[in-house]
Image (cartoon, rainbow, N blue to C red):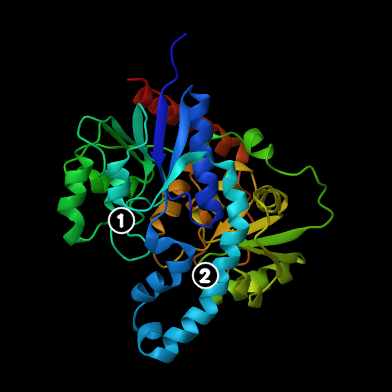
Amino acid sequence: MEKKKTVAYLTRHAVSNYGSVLQAYATQTALEKLGANAVCIDYYRTDEKTENLVDTRLKSVGAKWNKNALTRLVFKATQNPVYKFADKRFAEYKKIVKVTDKEYNSEQELADDIPQADIYMTGSDQVWNTVVCGEIDPVYFLSFLPDSAKKIAYAASFGGSEVLPKDKENIKKWLKRYDKITIRENSGVKIANELGVPAEQVLDPTFLLEKSEWEKLIPQRECSEKYVLVYQLHPNKQFDEYAKQYAKKKGLKLYRLSHCFHHIVRSGKFVCCPPIGEFLWYIKNAEHFLTDSFHGTAFAIGLNTQFTDVLPKSYSERISSILQLIGYENRILKSYNDFDIDSEKIDFEKVNEKISAERKKSLDILKNMIGD
């Protein structure tokens, strides 16, 4: 019997965020379905550890909170409990992802003790975007590996439609070391091509699992009421008010999911940090889903829930890209006075056919990448 190949992959798995954890789980599951041993490299930057995260963010949030000792004190006093609470909850949720026995906190630690694997892979999420400190992290470009190691990327993302001029040469150098690159957004493929690096577009790993596979995580519980669900990651008072008015006009209860307990001040019945399965349960059973999240959108599509997207001010390309793929760019809210955006229902039979075809193509590409 042929020995299974081990694929060690790097992604933003340690963030206390549903999308981050579930896309890592999907990557792991997809690789295992293709016959590989999958392990996520447990890389967790020192400056992104819970005890350091607020100080790191404080350096990159701009003058508003970093202008004097008092504003810095207020920022730390309000943000520290939020991160500690979410981290404590997500420590349990993250267990669905298999990670290396050793935790790595720097590029040097990885270079000194490289995890044993046949193939090394940059996974999905915004791995090639700036991290919390505001800089590009070369580790997510597999910079710690020797030239001889097999390096691939599956559904990696730059986050936006361009990279900073100061980062272009380094990114180009790092990308050219890969054996094969696939990217999540069409805008990301364009970035790579402009840098002289061939790349192919594939689905986010969450789409590699079929609806029935996600439903295995969802508790078998009846839904006794009809509701509108909000999953909002970015501050936006207009979105908040729109959600409240939408639910009122539709005669539905409003629920809000968040991993941040300070979002309790926003409209709707607040559900804070529910378990992974409960998070998916709320999306699956919603009459309508309002979100500004890419992975929120992905799960609405995957679980066949009617949805509306409110694009965030930055990094909205990833949402636009998947909506363009399924032919429903009209699900992007253009006016906060539009409460009839749901008048034309999404035809999920057609959407499922499209995703199924794209899933097969993406899995075939991934299989070829790990099979060579």
Q: Nearer the viewer, residue 278 or 310?
A: 278
Residue occupying image coordinates x 38% and y 70%: 56
The amino acid type found where label 2 is placed reads: Ser
The answer to the question of whether label 1 and label 2 lie on touching residues, with beta carbons closer than 8 A, is no
Residue on which disc 1 sits: 161
Residue occupying image coordinates x 26% and y 43%: 144
SS state under label 1: loop
Would you place residue 260 above or below residue 366 in this image? below
Q: Is residue 187 left or right of residue 334?
A: left
Q: Earlier in the sequence, mark 1 or mark 2?
A: 1
Q: Position of residue 306 (x, y in %)?
A: 64, 51
Would you place residue 270 above or below residue 174 in this image? below
Q: Position of residue 354 (x, y in %)?
A: 51, 34
| Residue 357 visible here | no
Q: Position of residue 284 (x, y in %)?
A: 69, 48
Instruction: Write down the quadrant of residue 341 in the picture.
Output: bottom right
SS state under label 2: loop
| Residue 224 visible here | yes
Label 2 CA crowd tier, 10 Å (few <14, some 14–19, many 20+): few
Q: Is residue 89 left or right of residue 126?
A: right
The amino acid type found where label 1 is placed reads: Ser
Would you place residue 251 above or below residue 139 in this image? below
Q: Nearer the viewer, residue 321 or 133?
A: 133
Q: How many marks?
A: 2
Say the numbered circle drawn on residue 335.
2
Residue occupying image coordinates x 44% and y 15%: 3
Instruction: Write down the quadrant of residue 102 in the picture.
Output: top left
